[in-house]
Image: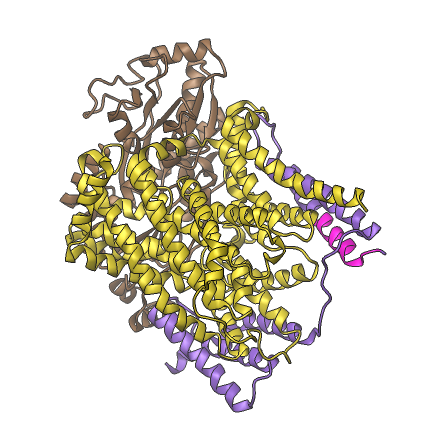
Amino acid sequence: MRRRFRRKSFFCFICVLLSVLGFQSVQAQEFPTKPVTLVIPLSAGGSHDLTARAVLTVAKKYLGQPIVIVNKPGGGGAIGTEAVAAAAPDGYTLLMGWPGSSTTLPAVEGRSKGPDDFVPVCLLNYSTTMIVVRSDLPYKTFNQFLDWGKANPGKLIYGTTGVWGNSDVAWKQISKLTGISAKVVPYNGGGPVVIAFLGDQIDATAMAIAPLLAHIRTGKLRILASLGEKREGLWPDIPTARELGVDVMNHNWRGVMAPKGTPRPIVEKLALAFKKMTEDKSVITMIKEQFGDDMHYKGPEEFAKYWRDEYEAHKELGKLYKK
Amino acid sequence: MDFLANLGNGFVIALTPGSLFYCGVGVILGTAIGVLPGLGPAATIALLLPITFKMEAVSALIMLAGIYYGAMYGGSTTSILLNIPGEAASVVTCIDGYQMARKGRAGRALGMSAIGSFIAGTISLLGVSIVAPSLAAFALKFGTPEYFSLVILGLLMAVYLSEESVIKGLIMCVAGLLLGTVGIDPVFGAQRFTFGLSKLVDGFDFVVVVMGLFGISEILCNMETPEIRDVFKTAIKGLYPTLEDWRRCWASVLRGSLIGFFIGVLPGGGGIISSFASYAVEKRISKHPEEFGRGAIEGVAAPESANNAASTSSFIPLLTLGVPGNSTIAMIFVAFMIHGIKPGPFLIREHPELFWGLLASMYIGNIMLLGLNLPLVGMWVRMLKVPYRYLAVLVVVICVVGAYSVSNSVFDVGVMAVFGVIGYLLRKAGLPSTPFVLAIILGPMLERNLQQALIASGGDLLVFFQRPISATLLSIAGLLMLSPLVRIYWRRSHQ
Amino acid sequence: MRKVGDILVGIIFLFIAMVFTIGGIRLRLGTPMEPQPGFFPFLGGVTLIVLAGILLVQGWQGKSSGTQAFGKLWGPLILIAGLAAYVAALEITGYIIATTLLSAIVLRILEAKSFWVLSVIALMLGVGSYLIFAELLGVPLPAGVLVKFW
């Protein structure tokens, strides 16, 4: 349920008034005077949700106000994304973007909202997509998995984090290259995929493994391959799909964006605060120890270019893979 | 009895002055949020998180958990007094709770709901202490076909609540499902039925819909006869539940607690469905079903017990699997992370003091909530002595502000007013609004699970009947639907 | 006897069902193996057509029941008009003025005792609720024309 809780003082009132009159620099000095909302277009418990929650523990220290998380999952991320795109461009409503609903869905289907409708604030980090299966299934290596899938067409159930999300795109590429086929079931982000995995509802997925880590450690789940350029530092024994002859690479990024029209000084203030949060020792430790990830901050310009390039590339990808 | 020793250690932690203090702060804050419309526990916890940095892990968790289950206690107050459900799980409390208030029995309804919540919370905690891990395994058996069947059963139970006409209940249920499709579709992200209005992209918000359908439409109905000066006409009969109330309710409270405990474990939607399910069960097995909808106290006791039991058992997926079931629980997840603890399969083994300390504090918190809420009953009841016109104005203002605050937009106030008129017309046409509201809330969940189940089974509808839990749920739904038909047939053939 | 109310309700829902059924077809139905966005609204629409049809037949045969007669309509109608005006005026006049007027209308319909009681309570509600929700709880209620005199 959506509910907001905002503490507003008389000063904020003046701020709004001044911003209408165009005193943007004054506004940026005052910003923020109340808590900021960060919408996550995916379910609680996925890697975007976990990362954002870890980073935002120190939001108040560097921004002066807390940042409140609101999960608005559904439609492959389109529901939360469109809600933020339609919000007031005042810096108080931000979106946690990801490739699925911020790049691929708009580039391929024209759904959700892409780089044309947002101002990039910053990139927090990215992680390599890993292929993970249930340990109790007969295949123990990536090649065995492919062989089994090809020998048993339509038997495999593959869960994705959303239509045209990273795991969906990765699977489309893998199945095109190798000829393996599966029933592809879309979930609302990584959190529900974990539950589906634990309940034996699905056999395999490819996603950022932060939410799966605990269950990989218990032995319930097994990593078969990574979709990185080279092997991961934390998982030196896990081969990349590329070295096994399946040339698919996939990274899942986490970036903060604001509705189009958000004043420049506010974006810069937010970007600076996020930069300091990603450099905070306690955050780095939490991210490393609990999710096995690093922080990779990129400022507004760098992130804009990264996002735009990906967007153009995915328009081409859509031509190849859209039915 | 291993768990007794563990729980004993937990109480040692929970009974320290510091723990008691934070527990008290948590439940008081929770009660306040629960009563005030427009303030959610998730946002409150988010704002308080920075304060908990310097606290000990146990203290922080005790306080935040207190806010969460405390909010569930307070949620029924506005349902009973003003016919405005504060949260989705309290919609069903309006049906009989508000009627009780109109008959001068508000105190008994509020008292029963507080005591029922206390009993349910305690039963649920006992369950969590004993069977948490195996219950988590049960929750995991719920795949998409099971969720689909559960929602179908929940919807048919809501239809069954409206005794007047099954066909009208079904019509409202399907209409609600269709209205729930307005906005972006839950699987593919395509816009549906928004007619180019960007404000509709997000669909209809629950708060906006119920404030109109319940709050405003009630005022509109009462305005037809303004000369009846007082809607709460009868003298107030007793502040607290009587012995007779207890004789009628104790079994309802127990059944509600059990239903809430089991369904509440399911991540997402569990609390809402359990409140409807327990109400339908009570009405079904009651010796005087005709009283339901006219102020039957079981109709308050059962759903309030259920939603409180559900709020407690919804901790299980987080504590044993590391999976937060809703966004409030996700906030508590962060409190764990801040202190370097990852909830999950190892939590009970690696941090027993934390797990058992938290559980023990919840027992204590429940007692505190009872002590806090019972004296408040008198205050709330006195509020109803104010002439109705002043209460009516208050309801209108609360609805207007509540709708506005959902996304700070006048558009939502307009939508709320339109739903007020719709609710008014529905009453005139004898169409029940409860299944309508439930279907709007559960529609996206039904659609997503239907689609996922169909994809995973290769388009085979039999999947819903082949899996045991799903098949059981659907059989219950089938029996429920057939029973009134059988009764009608019976009556007709004997005329 | 025919139940006019039920027949009317049936026709209205038949119309609504048609809108969703046709809308569903336009959105692409897909197949049960791979449902598309229009699949669910189409299913719901078809179900509703059947249900509304049954209600129509029942109403025609005079079987269904449960409708409630309208009482004096002027009260509800004035409040509905008041709410419409409220929505239209809220951002222009601001929250306090609009809410005070709306409260006055409600009190008037429900026959408040005197003009003075009515105005004082309406004003108290308008200003009081603004202070509680906007100042204390931080809901950014529109201030409207009062801003100029702040």
| Extreme residue in the right direction | C1
x, y percentage for residue B216?
Answer: 56, 66
Looking at this view, is A209 or B384 the one in front?
A: B384
Residue beneath the point at 59% across and 82% down: C108
The N terminus of chain B lies in quadrant: top left
Which tint was used for chain A?
brown
- Is residue B404 shown to the viewer in this render? no
Colour purple, chain: C
Residue B47 in percent (x, y) is at 28, 57
Q: What colour-coding does the image apply? A: by chain
| Quadrant in which residue B124 is drawn | top left
Q: As displayed, is residue A183 above or below residue B111?
A: above
Residue A281 or A255: which is nearer the viewer? A281
Examine the rendered structure and indicate whether residue B312 appears above or below residue B291: above
- The answer to whether residue B38 is left or right of residue B445 is left
Q: Residue at x 57, y 31 (%)?
A: C35
Res. A282 visible in picture: yes
Residue under the image location 53 percent in, 35 percent down: B148
Q: Position of residue B79 (x, y in %)?
A: 48, 62
- Secondary structure that dominates the magenta span: helix
Tell which chain the image draws in yellow: B
Residue drawn at 48 percent across, 52 percent down: B302
Q: Quadrant of residue C46?
A: top right
- When asked about the image quadrant of residue C66, the answer is bottom right
Span highlighted in magenta in the image: C2-16
